[in-house]
Image: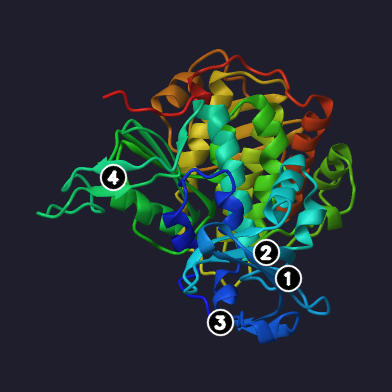
Amino acid sequence: MKVHSVSFDAWLAGHNPAHKDRSYREVYPWPIFEKLDYSDGMRNHVQDAVLGAERFSATVKESLPGDHGRLVFAVLLETPKDEPPGWFHGPWSALFHLVVEPDGRFVTLFAKGKEPGERLVKKFLRGELEGVAEVRSLPVSSMLFRSLLAFAADDIYGPLRPYERIEIVPGTCRYAPSSEGDTCVFQPFRSRGSDLWLLHAFTEEKAHRLALGFTGACKNLVVVYCHPTFTQHQRCASGSVQVISLSEFLGMGSERVRSMYMPQARFLLNHLRNNETHEPKDTEGEIRSRILSGSELTTGITTSDLREAKSGLGRIISTTGDAAYALACANLLNAALNKKLRLYTGATRLEKDVYSFKAALGIAIEQMARYPIDDVHVTVMPEDLILVRVRGLQFSFHAVPRSERLRSYAISEANVPQEWSGIRLQPTASLVLRWARAVVACERKASPAPASAPATDRAKPKINKG
């Protein structure tokens, strides 16, 4: 017997869009189940199936009677244990129940017992990243991204509705062009009617495409991406739209969310590789001493560091760790673009106009100046230079846009002069970023929800009231 129409879209058509297991079901290797032979003669026979370059073994264990004359097939799906996990569909070892009509038409599919994805999400949110890295794949990465995004959204905005069906008036956005057809219907990832939509895309470029397509469909549109894009691409500049990285989005949340889930954001950036477990376990003070000694050799910049720096620069600044991290990210981007140093040798071409990171850096320094933080000292020099000292490490930046607030700070008594230390941080940019991670980790260990500056407009989501 052959079954047909087995797909996640078909599953969605027969279930509530906000089904509690939707995220877990989405990662199933759906095409496999349509490839199998369900005839009586194939019971308990191992069937091999291929999706792209990935191999699966499936065994139809039994056929059970279901409600309304339907058939329920128990299918054991496994991937070879002697091969590395496949990136596009991931490793599997689970018993599934496939429900079909008597003519083989698909009804539903679910894992018997606890969903495998649910266990991974719980490990991920608890910070047990090594266990997740063992089953790294693109579907798992996407599922974890959505799970973290949903958790943070509840913290930032309060309860939002998942996958709410919303009608879009034709002509209000590119997605719903003006026509004589029916009103378009869309289901945002999270929403509050037409007031606020939260969407997601794995890459920055796709996030901007989404933003361009849905601008005008709601009052406030937020699109969060996981991986930054380094090449030129079209960008959405609408005032009612925010296109931000996952790190920036987490930074909008409470201190608990900010302190607990930044490691998970870096883990997602690094394709579910926990690079920090392979780094030397030097303390923050030891790393700082190495940098200040001036004897440290230049360190190459990896693509994973570059992704982290571009995503992390927009972090909301409210603690010493936040300041250290944002400055280290800006320093690394500066170093990567410095052709004389030649520290970044990755294959990705870096477009200077794409970065525009000095504008984000200016906002971060403005926050440090407006809301004093222990161990963070900002000096805005009369000319082009800005110096920021954090825990004895001094950062220097040129060509940072001078906002009105920075110009006011420059002529205030709070702008205490400091001399340049003479230590250039760009040659050891990767080590400086590791130091910043250590500062953040120290804060996290000291207090899961560190006390910091009072709640201000710097940590509030931008919501258009108009």
Residue at 61%, 71% (x, y): give it.
88
Residue wearing tag 1: 76
Q: Secondary structure beneath disc 3? A: loop
Among the two numbered marks 3 and 4 on one chain, the one whose residue lies closer to the N terminus: 3
Residue wearing tag 2: 96
Residue wearing tag 4: 215
The mark lying in front, picked from 2 and 4, is 2
Quadrant hosting residue 96? bottom right
Give the quadrant of the C terminus.
top left
Asked if marks 3 and 1 touch (Cβ < 8 Å), the reply is no
Which of 140/338 is in front?
140
Residue at 60%, 65% (x, y): give it.
98
Measured as percent of width and height from the top left, residue 149 is found at: 56, 42
Q: Give the answer, above or below, for where 289 lies relative to 347.
A: above
Among the two numbered marks 1 and 2 on one chain, the one whose residue lies closer to the N terminus: 1
Gap in Å between the C-alphas at discs 3 and 4? 47 Å
The mark lying in front, picked from 3 and 2, is 3
Asked if marks 3 and 4 touch (Cβ < 8 Å), the reply is no
Among the two numbered marks 3 and 1 on one chain, the one whose residue lies closer to the N terminus: 3
Q: Which amino acid does label 2 sit on?
A: Phe
